[in-house]
Structure formats: structure tokens, C-alpha cells
Image: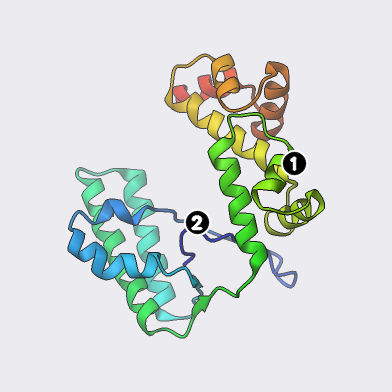
Amino acid sequence: MINRRKIHRILNDNSLKICKKKTFIFNPDILFKDETMYKKYMLPMLSDNGFSHMRFSYKSSLSKEILNLINEIEDIYNSKPLGYEMEITSIMIMILRRLYIAYQTSNETIKDRENPNIQIQRKMSRFIYENFGSKISLDDIANSGSVSKSTCMRIFKEYTGKSPIEFLNSYRLERSAQMLEETSALITEISLECGFFQQSYYNKLFLKEYGLTPKKYRKLFHSL
């Protein structure tokens, strides 16, 4: 389990020929309409800034239980029986209960090491998230973290595998794809709103990232 707002990545062990992963992302806020339960059980865990993640052995009974529940959610979502949302919600709460117990009792809870570079990375990433629609230079990103351009580039490469500008463009593309799916705005308007001020450059990057032009991406999404 990886806590929210934690920089992370997954690497394959070189000794393994095949690596499989299943990512299950959810917002716990939507599961707890009862504020008392949320404050008692979820908030202490989620707001623990030192709590990075919990690691479970794939052989442990808890790991198998959680994986089985996640697989059950996947099956229910794919088949969508009557009232499937309620059933998924109940299973997610079962998962959260197991995670909460593990958080309170397990030795597998991993605390963040005090690394100032992680805090700097978060500041710079937050700057990008909040200003991606504006013209942003490498200087702007570095200044948001109060570091030099070379340090900025090194930190981004270390924690994201990308340069600062590549990270920025990747986020812009992600947001533009979301707008193509959810709005009827003109593609030119979407590109401008997401910080791409040259339509041809936006089309080129989008095609490289998604294998489709923005127009074809939108058409394909709405045909599904």
C-alpha cells in the first residue's frame, strides 16, 4: 500500500523474467460519509506524513486476502450486476479495514527517510500541477524549488525518470486527454488551456504519447 502524495516507482527485479503488477487507485474520502469513522480510522493514516507505504509478502495471508478482494472488485466492475457500485464500496471498506489493522500492528510499515530532495521534488511538481496551463520554463520550475537548473534536472531524473520539461509535457498531455474525454471543447481550446501554444507541436506530442491524434483519440473514446 502506497500512501497518498508519495513519490514512487516500480522496478523489475533483474532476476525475474516476468513482472506482473496490478494497480488499484481509489479515493478513500468517497467511502466515508460518516465523518466520525473517517476521522477515527482513515485520517490518522492518510495524514501521517512519515508513513510512506506498507510492504506485504506475496506469501502472507493478508496479502492474499487483499488481492482476492481486489480481483473480486475487478470481476464485479466488469460484469456490472444490479447494484454493483454498492457491492464494490462494501468490498473496498473491507480492504481498508485490513490495511488499517496492518498500519497499526505490522512491522512492514515503512517510514519516509528524511530526504530534502523529496520535499524539493514535491514543491516543483506542485508548481507544475498548479501552473501547467501557463508558459513555464526550466528556470521557473527550478525557482519553485529554490534550486539551480542542474539540480532541478538531476532531481527530476532521479525521481521521475524524466527531465522537468518532459514531466511538464507529460502532465499537460494527460490533462488534455482528460478534457478530450470529458468535454466538447474545441481541440485548439484544449491545447491552449493545457499550455500548448502551437497546435502542431501539441498534435506531434499527443501522437507520440497516445499513438493517435487528439481528434482520433476523442472519436475513439466516445465510440467505446
In the depicted view, which residue is nearer to us: 148 or 179? 148
* Residue type at tag 2: Thr
**Picture quadrant where residue 42 is located:** bottom left
Residue identifier under label 2 = 23
> Closer to the observer: label 1 or label 2?
1
Q: Relative to 66, is 134 on the left or the right? A: right
Quick one: which residue is furthest to the right in this view?
150
- Tell me where residue 86 appears, x and y as whole percent: 21, 50
Find numbered disc 2 in the image and state the secondary structure of the residue it sits on.
loop
Q: Are marks 1 and 2 in contact (CB under 8 Å)?
A: no
Pointer 1: residues within 10 angstroms few (<14), some, or many (20+)? few
Q: Is residue 119 left or right of residue 109?
A: right
Residue 115, disc: none
* Rendered image: mark on residue 139: 1
The picture quadrant where one finds residue 66 is bottom left
Which one is nearer the viewer's eye here, 72 or 27? 27
Horizontal placement of 186 versus 17: left or right? left
Q: CA distance from mark 1 to mark 2?
A: 34 Å
- Residue 137 rendering spot, x and y as whole percentages: 72, 36
- The residue at the point 39 percent across, 60 percent down is 70
Q: Position of residue 189 (x, y in %)?
A: 55, 16
Q: Is residue 65 above or below residue 27?
A: below
Determine whether 164 is above or below 22 in the image.
above
Screen quadrant of the C terminus: top left
Q: Out of 125 and 32, give the one closest to the viewer.
A: 125
139 relative position to 68: left or right? right
Judging depth in this view, the residue of 116 and 183 nearest the camera is 116
Residue 10 visible within the image: no
Relative to 44, residue 78 above or below: above
Tell me the element at label 1.
Answer: helix
Residue 76 coordinates in the image, percent (x, y):
31, 50
